[in-house]
């Protein structure tokens, strides 16, 4: 299609199907394919020559123009005459819904209004970066009814881990349209309040840390080859109240000493740092994990269920671990923890980010355990998640609001000028119970709420992209979520794990 053909396009309807007056004001725009589109760019890229479009056109109208220029969509989608051959029509690719960025903001208003709000002049062509829109989450399966509420969950290495109000850890894997429960182990006597998992590349073991209202903190080791989950270590001496948050880190094969560490927070605002015993520690119980800084550690051998002998295997030896550091980080419940990294390729964390019911957020230097940044918000922090590629943090609150915090520091113990607080438009109708950033897209995050909904957000807009019902019945609460490989999972007071395709 020639550039002259592109310049002549004059859509007769806007995205609401309203007839457009051909004499109305026009705005010149250039369509630029977003750099975030990495696949099939040659099929989606358009010439960048400016063209005129109606000034009040919206996203759907612009999407129709781009599809027309790309020669995509059904024959009836445009005003082609009947002379086009059936063969040509059959060769056309299906239309794609597109989203548009104007000055790095998602277009959600008429084009002229958006340009005016951003202070952009329309005397020159506006640059619109386009990319395929994110489709609404589509329910693809669910688990059977579980005995109690699903409090927390995390996805790791192809497996979903959940913690229930009955104190039980469960794993789930997809089987047809149903999520089948795998390993089931009673880990606590009270409701599980937090979970974190980490796969050790050197041993193929996955460590699962859970904290509970019964004031216990433990790790279990999952052997993927044997399909077995067993108690690995018990952590004592760091907390005197319910464990409300936990985060594992380290253990990668790239850089660092390859050892795992763990942070945990409690209801009183206490923060503890632990060295997680490795897979070799069970056969060498006198080794000091973490060197001089490591807390005291002893080992206990568990009796085999089928004999009177004891087992010295990894599964049979339970480690007892003391904290490396223990501080009073906040004056109230630490509801969220996240490790910070100097670079996306680093496997060892450099900072620890905390959020609390005392309205505060803090950044700790891991090597010194000094607080290098403290921010005071206006609301309780009920949940916290860190962006995958920077120390930008999203938090949820009881006031139904999602807030973004740029908590990057200058590396010298002081804060940089980029620290900011941005509030997204209030959309939930109740307490924001969980929040998680997409592991693959630094602009996308998801939230669940006591209103029973799951929302997907793009932070370049203050409004959510999509909202879906995440619970079965009215009044049920959605309590947790986890991003998977192209999926998102949720759970709550309806006692069912649901899986949505993204």
Image: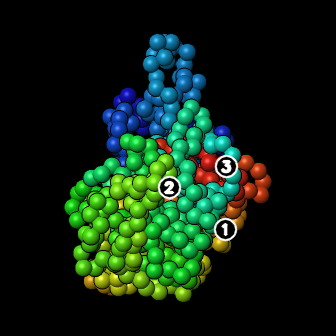
The local crowd at label 1, few if under 14, some if 14 to 19, many if 20 or more residues have their Cα within 10 Å, is: many
Question: For numbered disc 1, what is the local secondary structure?
Answer: loop
Q: Quadrant of residue 419?
A: bottom left
Q: Which residue is mark 2?
A: 154
Residue at (39, 48) in percent of width and height: 223
Q: Secondary structure at mark 2?
A: strand
- State the separation of the CA atoms marked 1 and 3: 23 Å
Locate the N terminus by quadrant.
top left
Q: Nearer the viewer, residue 309 or 465?
A: 309
Residue 318 seen in render = yes
The residue identified by callout 3 is 146
Q: Quadrant of residue 331?
A: bottom right
* Residue holding disc 1: 431
Task: Compare marks 3 and 2 and give the one earlier in the sequence.
Answer: 3
Asked if marks 1 and 2 touch (Cβ < 8 Å), the reply is: no
Disc 3 residue crowd, few under 14, some 14–19, many 20+, Cα 10 Å = some
Q: Residue at image x 30%, y 67%?
A: 285
User: What residue sits 30% from the left and 63% below the top?
Assistant: 281
For the residue carrying disc 2, how many other residues have a C-alpha within 10 Å: few (<14), some (14-19), or many (20+)? many
Q: Is residue 115 visible?
A: no
In the rendered image, residue 36, in percent from the top left (x then y), is placed at: 37, 49
Residue at horizontal 65%, vertical 59%? 166
Checking the image for residue 132, the label placed there is none
Give the percent coordinates (x, y) of residue 324: 35, 79
Q: Is residue 263 left or right of residue 256?
A: right
């Amino acid at each position: 299609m020639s550039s002259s053909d592109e310049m002549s396009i004059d859509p007769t309807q806007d995205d609401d199907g309203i007839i457009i007056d051909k004499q109305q004001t026009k705005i010149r725009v250039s369509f630029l394919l977003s750099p975030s589109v990495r696949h099939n760019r040659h099929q989606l890229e358009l010439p960048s020559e400016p063209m005129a479009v109606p000034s009040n056109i919206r996203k759907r109208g612009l999407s129709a123009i781009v599809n027309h220029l790309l020669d995509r969509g059904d024959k009836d989608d445009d005003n082609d005459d009947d002379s086009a051959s059936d063969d040509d029509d059959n060769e056309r690719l299906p239309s794609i819904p597109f989203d548009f960025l104007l000055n790095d903001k998602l277009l959600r208003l008429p084009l002229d209004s958006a340009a005016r709000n951003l202070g952009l002049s329309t005397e020159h062509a506006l640059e619109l970066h386009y990319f395929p829109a994110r489709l609404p989450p589509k329910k693809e399966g669910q688990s059977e009814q579980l005995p109690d509420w699903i409090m927390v969950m995390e996805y790791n290495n192809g497996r979903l881990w959940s913690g229930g109000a009955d104190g039980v850890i469960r794993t789930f894997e997809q089987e047809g349209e149903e999520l089948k429960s795998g390993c089931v182990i009673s880990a606590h006597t009270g409701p599980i309040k937090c979970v974190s998992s980490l796969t050790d590349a050197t041993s193929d073991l996955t460590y699962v840390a859970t904290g509970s209202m019964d004031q216990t903190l433990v790790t279990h080791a999952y052997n993927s080859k044997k399909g077995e989950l067993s108690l690995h270590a018990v952590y004592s001496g760091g907390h005197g109240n319910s464990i409300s948050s936990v985060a594992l880190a380290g253990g990668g094969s790239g850089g660092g000493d390859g050892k795992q560490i763990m942070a945990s927070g409690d209801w009183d605002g206490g923060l503890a740092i632990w060295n997680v015993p490795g897979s070799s520690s069970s056969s060498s119980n006198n080794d000091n994990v973490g060197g001089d800084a490591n807390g005291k550690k002893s080992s206990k051998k568990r009796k085999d269920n089928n004999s009177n002998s004891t087992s010295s295997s990894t599964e049979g030896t339970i480690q007892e671990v003391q904290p490396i550091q223990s501080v009073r980080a906040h004056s109230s419940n630490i509801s969220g923890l996240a490790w910070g990294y100097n670079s996306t390729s680093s496997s060892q964390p450099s900072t620890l980010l905390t959020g609390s019911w005392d309205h505060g957020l803090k950044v700790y230097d891991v090597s010194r355990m000094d607080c290098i940044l403290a921010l005071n918000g206006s609301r309780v922090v009920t949940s916290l998640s860190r962006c995958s590629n920077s120390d930008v943090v999203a938090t949820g609150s009881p006031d139904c609001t999602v807030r973004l915090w740029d908590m990057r520091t200058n590396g010298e113990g002081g804060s940089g000028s980029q620290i900011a607080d941005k509030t997204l438009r209030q959309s939930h109708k109740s307490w924001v119970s969980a929040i998680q950033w997409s592991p693959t897209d630094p602009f996308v995050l998801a939230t669940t709420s006591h209103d029973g909904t799951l929302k997907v957000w793009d932070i370049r807009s203050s409004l959510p992209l999509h909202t879906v019902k995440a619970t079965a019945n009215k009044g049920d609460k959605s309590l947790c979520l986890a991003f998977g490989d192209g999926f998102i999972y949720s759970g709550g007071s309806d006692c069912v794990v649901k899986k949505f395709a993204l």
